[in-house]
């Protein structure tokens, strides 16, 4: 594999989407017991996505501030052109297939849900979080983070700031979840999925960003990286067992993901970072949007021919084998096209600013 100092970032995305696919296959086939709990844990791949997203967002936003005349406008153009058109295609796809019926996991959408999904504010309303596009809640959370990034970048300027921000948002998130669940019971999943609940996960990504800036080669000793891995496993186990419930379990797991990522900076394990996982990571957004449809159609096609663990195994295996090539086509011909369109708009904006002599004031302020 060609050397890329950030290959581990794409690989982590790859593992994240694989975990999410396995989780949704388990829930669709009603896998229960201890195996069901283990499979459900793969859903924490969403929080791994959030860590990686915050890392890459801070990295690219910093570069834009240093090199571009309109860094903030360009940032929003890049990020939203990567997400919004594809999500809108997802709205069209799932509506064409299911209409207003259930997508397979929750109740189907009502018409008033559509404006929320079109504006990617669906996570703000409990009944609409994932009603039109399955899994849409996490994309809505992601977009809310995009929209607030200039604020966070202004507030969080160092590793110390990132740690303080994450600690503060973690405390606030835990209180928000608990208070919300007490005030409005019966929608615990909504409080978990809410932006305040997930914001600390982005905070862990900010920590990773500033840590990598300070330690571009990672930890150079094998024992130090082994220690990080052991601590990561310990935190993941605490999250899985909910052994310390005073801190919501997804924060423990996300902290473990942070330590895992830190251990990969210097010595990326070939079991985690390889051609396959990097490739899967590159197509992970399309895979996320499409895998719900693929899994549901496979499950429907099986009728009652296989049940139990066998049904889960078939839906998972076939689901992955179908999702990945379809996602690659989506990435190659749709995602890339929208991304390139955004790049052209940015290039035109920057070239016009140079042509008309717009002064670059980025060194002194952010536009």
Image: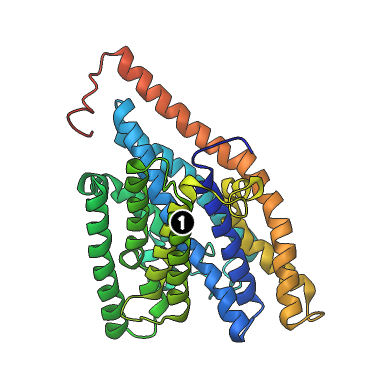
Locate residue 60: give its quadrant. Answer: top left
Q: Quadrant of the N terminus?
A: top right
Please give the residue where the numbered disc 1 appears in the rendered image.
223
**Figure check: 290 above or below 234:** above
Q: Where in the figure is residue 194, as x and y percent of width and height?
A: 36, 67
Compared to 337, does 96 lie above or below? below
Q: Closest to the observer: 258 or 24?
A: 258
Residue at 39% across / 70% down in the picture?
Answer: 252
**Badge 1, how many Cα within 10 Å: few under 14, some, many 20+?**
few
Q: Quadrant of residue 29?
A: bottom right
Label 1, secondary structure: give it.
helix
Report x, y in % for residue 245.
35, 81
In the rendering, at what x and y percent does residue 93 appear? 61, 56
Task: Name above or below for residue 143 compared with residue 97.
Answer: above
Residue drawn at (75%, 63%) of the image: 318
Q: Could one spot residue 112 in this view of the protein?
A: no
Residue 138 is situated, as x and y percent measured from the top left of the image, at 45, 61
Report whether 73 appears left or right of 94.
left
From the image, which quarter does the C terminus lie in?
Answer: top left
The answer to which of 271 and 327 lies nearer the viewer is 271
Is 344 above or below relative to 286?
A: above
Q: Is residue 45 visible?
A: yes
Outermost residue, right side: 305
Q: Residue 179 vs residue 325: left or right?
A: left
Left or right of 8 on screen, residue 33: right
Q: How many marks?
A: 1
């Amino acid at each position: 594999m060609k050397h890329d100092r950030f290959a581990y970032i794409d690989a982590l995305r790859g593992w994240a989407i694989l975990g999410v696919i396995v989780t949704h296959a388990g829930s669709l086939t009603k896998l229960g017991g201890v195996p069901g709990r283990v499979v459900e844990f793969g859903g924490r791949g969403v929080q791994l996505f959030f860590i990686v997203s915050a890392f890459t967002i801070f990295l690219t936003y910093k570069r834009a501030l240093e090199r571009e005349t309109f860094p903030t406008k360009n940032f929003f153009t890049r990020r939203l052109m990567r997400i919004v058109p594809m999500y809108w295609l997802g709205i069209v796809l799932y509506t064409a297939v299911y209409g207003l019926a259930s997508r397979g996991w929750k109740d189907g959408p009502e018409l008033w849900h559509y404006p929320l999904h079109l504006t990617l504010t669906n996570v703000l309303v409990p009944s609409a979080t994932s009603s039109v596009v399955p899994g849409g809640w996490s994309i809505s959370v992601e977009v809310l983070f995009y929209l607030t990034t200039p604020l966070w970048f202004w507030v969080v300027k160092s590793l110390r700031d990132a740690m303080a921000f994450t600690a503060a948002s973690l405390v606030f998130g835990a209180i928000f979840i608990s208070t919300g669940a007490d005030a409005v019971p019966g929608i615990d999943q909504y409080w978990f999925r809410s932006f305040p609940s997930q914001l600390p996960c982005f905070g862990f990504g900010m920590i990773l960003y500033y840590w990598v800036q300070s330690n571009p080669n990672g930890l150079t000793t094998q024992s130090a990286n082994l220690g990080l891995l052991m601590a990561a496993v310990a935190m993941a186990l605490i999250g899985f067992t909910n052994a310390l419930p005073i801190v919501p379990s997804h924060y423990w797991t996300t902290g473990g993901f942070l330590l895992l990522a830190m251990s990969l900076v210097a010595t990326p394990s070939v079991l985690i970072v390889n051609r396959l996982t990097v490739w899967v990571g590159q197509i992970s957004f399309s895979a996320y949007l499409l895998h719900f449809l693929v899994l549901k159609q496979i499950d429907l096609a099986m009728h009652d021919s296989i049940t139990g663990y066998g049904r889960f195994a078939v839906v998972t295996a076939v689901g992955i084998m179908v999702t990945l090539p379809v996602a690659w086509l989506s990435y190659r011909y749709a995602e890339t096209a929208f991304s390139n369109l955004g790049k052209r708009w940015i290039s035109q904006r920057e070239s016009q600013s140079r042509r008309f002599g717009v002064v670059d004031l980025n060194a002194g302020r952010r536009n």
